[in-house]
Every structure is written in C-alpha cells, then in structure tokens.
Amino acid sequence: MGKLFIALTFFIVSSARFYSQEVAVENTLETKLQSVVDSLTTASNYPGMVFSYVEPDGEVVSLASGHADLESQEKMTTNHKMLSGSTGKTFVSAIAFKLMEQGKLDLYEPLKKYLEKEDWFTKIPNHETLIIKHLMNHSSGIQRYEFKPEFIEDVVKDADRIWQPVELLQYIFNDEPLFEAGKGYSYADTNYILLGMVIEQIAGKTFYELLETDITTPFKLNSITPSSIKKIDGMACGYSGEENLFKFTNRSIDENGFLNNTQFEWTGGGLAFKTSDYARWLKLLHEGKVINMRLFGGEFYDAIETNEGGKYGLGVQVFELPQLGTLYGHMGFFPGYLTLGFYNPGTKVVGVMQINTSEDEKLKGLFRNYMALMDVLIKNYKG
C-alpha cells in the first residue's frame, strides 16, 4: 500500500550507512542471526518478529522472537502467518508474465484494448495513452485510491464489506493525472487493481484461482492464503496503533477473525503467509523458476528511478547498496504488519523480515534492523 510504503522505501537508502551492528561471534549462522533477531525485537519494542532466510542451496531457516499476541502472551513462532501488504504484487506480476509467455498479454498493448467497453473507462486518468507496462511499473500517473479520505471513511464502516474492483477505482475517477503516462513515477495500488482486472478478463478465472493453479500449488507454497476471507488459521495479531491513518482498531484480529476490512486490498497485495514461504518465493522468482528470465528478464528488471530512493521494475524493487550490493525484492505494509524481503544475486541468498506492528514510533529503526540481519547473512556467504 502507498504512503507508508513510500516513506519506508525512502529510508532504506538513507539509513544504509548506519546499519552496522556489533554481533557476538557464535558457532553457527543460525545462532548468530537468532541472537540479532532477539536483540532487535527487544530494542525496537516490536510485539514479535520472524526472520526467514534461504541459503544458496535452497535450504530455508526461520527464526522467531517476541509475541504473536501481546494480550494472551502467545509466543511468536515460525508457523505464524502475517499479512503481505504490497509484497503480493510480486505474485500479480508473475501471473501477468505467465500470460505473456502464452502470447495472451503484451506489455505495450493499450489498456483500452481490455477495458474500453466498460462504461467507466473514460473516467480513468490518462485512459487513452495507458499501456500495461505503465501499470506494472507505476508510471501511469494515476493516484492511490487507498489513501483518499473518502475511501478511508468508507472502509472503516464495514469490516465485512466485499469490495468490487470498480468500487475501488471510483475514488480516482476523473482525477487530474499526476503526469503524462510513462513520464514519471508514483506508487499506487490502483495500478495493480487495473492489472488484476485485465488478468482476470484474459484468463477467464479469478486472480486467486490463478494464484493457486499457477503459483502456490506447483511450487508448494502452502501457507499463502488470500486475505479476502474473514478468518485465517495461524494468524499473528497485528498492532497498528491507537491513532493510525486508516482509523483501524489497534488489534487486527480476535477469535472470530479480522476486526478490520482486509478484502479490499486484492491485487494491490491481498495475501497472508508464513515468512518462510515468501522467502522461498523470492528465491524461485529471481532465479528464473517462475518467469522465463531469458525472454523477459530484461523487461522485468528494467527499473525506473523512484521519488523515494531505489528503482522500480515490473513488480520488483531494485536497490544498489554499497554495503550489501544488489537487492531484488519487494516490501509490504498493511495496518498492523510490515514485510521486508530481498534476494541478493551476488550470494544467491534471500532474507525476509516480518513484524506484527505498523505503529509509527516503532518503525524508526526498521531498515537498520533489516540491514543488520542481511549484513550477517550476506557476509557469511561472501566469505
């Protein structure tokens, strides 16, 4: 999701030089990282944290610290799930590329080829000049629907409302474009809502059906679950703070399921998962097991400069950091949860960190904390 996503992204670069941590020498990489996870959870006052990493040979290790529920004092475990936030866009992008492999979709096709028959299509900013690629790299000039005051007011009214995609789009109907299509960058879930509509029209299936048949089942990513359902087994409780932008309840769940509406996110994010499965996913994706990178890698990683640091490709964030090298991945925010996950091509390792809070005062050291963990991980395999 948008505004917090942009603020967080900005700090990954500006904080990079300050991430060094003193880490006691331990016998194994796993014990080193567990020590860091524990210390960071305590020092930053996170309710809980899970850190999963994938080694070059594909072995996955997960570490947990803190609590999945502060009120009941339930311990956080590596089997708990958390909401994905915008990391879900990596799956949407992959499905779009699968349609390209089948010759059913082209990056340079106009959006109107698919949607111009809809009576609302002419209300989309830049509707005449938009192509599929503009949606995938956020160069459409369309604003974020999810931070419109009218949407925030409406979404808190009914935690059980089932939002249709066009109902989300109506919040940006007839807006002035932020810039000409393809002439700038502005991150917006709205782009991936439109992309999801195109995908479903081409495939004749729902996005979540495609996710299951094309991604989660063949790659055995068994914990990945749509966040469109009221109750998800194994969820860690998220904490968004008493005064949060969405005016959501501080606690995200009770015994009956989500206390706030999660269904609306859809192809802007729209998932819950174990940290380990997102880590496995990044390894599969960036090592060419999902997308034919020989055909599409050039486009996938053809990243444009963003206005918050780093670059953005077609559903992938790209960072070049002096201390850590190249990082490919995606971050995600949904009230109560934050996810940071990246693949380092130099060492072929992945590190994913999830915390069950989005309280502003607890996020100031977020990237320093993530980079401290990645520093230990990457250095171990650099030798």
Image (spheres, rainbow, N blue to C red):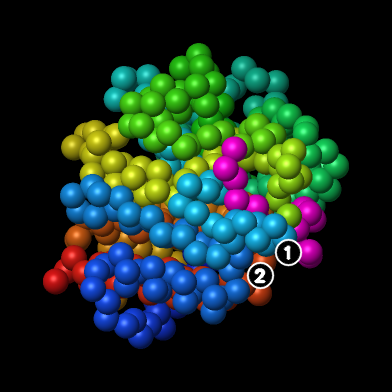
Where does residue 315 sit, x and y in percent of width and height?
42, 45
Point out the image quarter for the C terminus.
Answer: bottom left
- The residues colored magenta run 233-250
Where does residue 134 sit, x and y in percent of width and height?
47, 41
Disc 2 designates what residue? 360
Is residue 64 rendered to the left or right of residue 361? left
Q: Nearer the viewer, mark 2 or mark 1?
A: 1
Label 2 crowd (10 A; few <14 / some 14-19 / many >=20): few
Between discs 2 and 1, the one toward the N terminus: 1
Residue 191 visible somewhere in the drawing: no
Disc 2, disc 1: CB below 8 Å? Answer: yes
Disc 1 designates what residue? 241
Determine which quarter of the picture holds residue 269. top right
Q: Tag 1's secondary structure?
A: loop
Q: Is residue 139 above or below residue 39?
A: above
238 part of magenta stretch? yes
- The type of residue carrying mark 1 is Gly
- The type of residue carrying mark 2 is Asp
Is residue 360 rendered to the left or right of residue 377? right
62 part of magenta stretch? no
Label 1 crowd (10 A; few <14 / some 14-19 / many >=20): many
- Say which residue appears at 59% left-offset and 38% top-offset: 233
Determine which quarter of the picture holds residue 109. top left
Q: Which mark is residue 210?
A: none
- Say which residue appears at 59% left-offset and 22% top-offset: 116
